Amino acid sequence: MKNSTVKLAMYLNYFVFAILLNSVGIVILKAQKNYGVDELQASVLEAYKDLPIAIVSFLIASFLPRLGYKKAMLIGLGLVSIACITMYFGNSFETAKILFATVGVSFALIKVSVYSLIGTITRNQQEHNSLMSSIEGVFMIGIALAYFLFPAFNSDGNPDSWLNVYWLLAAISLLSFAFLFFTKFDNQTEIPGVDLIDDFKQMFKLFAKLLTIVFVISAFLFVMIEQGIMSWLPTFNSKVLHLPENISIMMASILAISLAVGRLLAGVITKRVSWIWVLSVCIIAAMLIVIFVLPKTVGLEVKDINSLSDIPLIGFAFPLVGLFIAPIYPLLNSVVLSALPQKLHSSMTGLIVVFSALGGTLGSRVIGYLFKNEGPQNAFYYTLIPMSLLLISFFVLKKLTASNVVKLEVKNDNA
């Protein structure tokens, strides 16, 4: 089996789930308009997406090497194909909950499999960083496409027209299923589990390490920031900038495009610059955008907007925060996974996904609460708190992972 074929399968799977997972912000906006729910009620969709990711990842992370990464990903793609068709016929807030719960369960299977596979087809930390950043970059490209895909099916004259997009998403999922089905995985790529109970215990042992504790807190904080902004940016554009619905959604794509560019660039930059300096500069730049650019965006007077070209340039500035927060997540994951033995990658990935999901859920709920109680013009200022904590965590992780990497290198040399 060629590694390039496996990589392509990983890219395709991540691309499909990027569209499905991050359509939650669009569906939150549609739910308020079509299903008569308020901001806080609509924000529960994030929990329906993220909590199944957390629960399933925790329960099956150690089991996946025994099941097989290919089988796990096929199951995930099959489930979301059915869920998309169900959403079309269901057309209700309850069906939307079922859709995102299914997407969450399926993505847990996909993400744990993909992250574990990266370690088996890369030779060193630089390759690991690069592939991780590239895969996450493709993920963000899928997110950006979602912001154009949904408006393409939306019609002011037919409030249900947007549901037709789920036929296309079901078809894309089935195509990805077919490609993966015919992709051959060799014995070196699929690592059999030694002992299921022992593997499950390894996850708890990992969680007892200071390195793991600091890392999962960092992952939690980052996803809280990213998902909080991403899920609520369409609503921010609609209620603060008073943009038409379709343009509000398309404007949010700037954030996704910025995230994609930032992650792809990070894969190149980290080959020459230490990850700690890349992440430190990025988080400080993101904080400066919130402090200095966001107030000008909030105070923007927008009139007669019929297309993206009608929006003043400053209106595009705040979503560029994605360019600077983009490298954080894939680089943190890569640094920690590279510091651990291959046999622990699946267990650690389970913890990554669990706390990422919890961070996404809390981030969306907090921003939803702030939108309702503090006003949509003030909600995003609160992201400065987790950003500040992240900056501190980078230097703690640098010290902890450096010592772990040295120990592992010595162990490998003696093997």
Image (cartoon, rainbow, N blue to C red):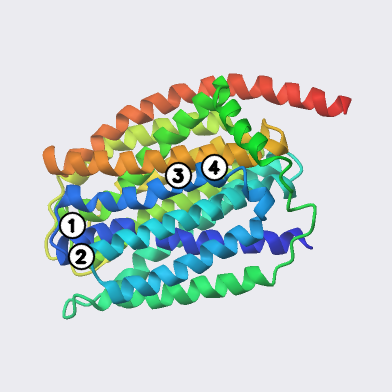
Amino acid type, mark 2 = Glu
Disc 3 target residue = 55
Q: Position of residue 290 (x, y in %)?
A: 29, 36
Residue at which label 2 appears: 245
Q: CA distance from mark 4 to mark 3?
A: 21 Å
Q: Are marks 2 and 1 in contact (CB under 8 Å)?
A: yes
Give the foreground label among 3 and 1: 3
Q: How many marks?
A: 4
Q: Position of residue 367 (x, y in %)?
A: 24, 41
User: Which amino acid lies under the numbered mark 4 shown in the image of this protein?
Assistant: Pro
Q: Which residue is mark 1?
A: 238
Give neighbour class at mark 1: few <14, some 14-19, many 20+ (Cα, 10 Å).
many
- Per the model, the C-alpha gap separating discs 4 and 2 is 31 Å
Residue 304: where, in percent of width, then height? 12, 65
SS state under label 1? helix
Q: Is residue 252 left or right of residue 211?
A: left
SS at circle 4: helix
Q: Give the image location of residue 97, x and y in percent.
A: 30, 59
Asked whether 263 or 310 is in front, the reply is 263
The amino acid type found where label 1 is placed reads: Ser
- Seen in the picture, residue 303 relative to 59 is either above or below; the reply is below
Instruction: State the separation of the CA atoms marked 2 and 1.
Output: 6 Å
Which residue type does callout 3 highlight?
Answer: Ile
Residue located at (86% from left, 27% from top): 413
Q: Looking at this rendering, what residue extends furthest in the front direction?
A: 197
- Give the CA distance from mark 3 to mark 1: 33 Å
Verify CB contact (< 8 Å) between mark 3 and mark 2.
no
Q: Which mark is residue 330?
A: 4
Question: For the point 58% across and 44% down, which residue is it?
Answer: 61
> SS at mark 3?
helix
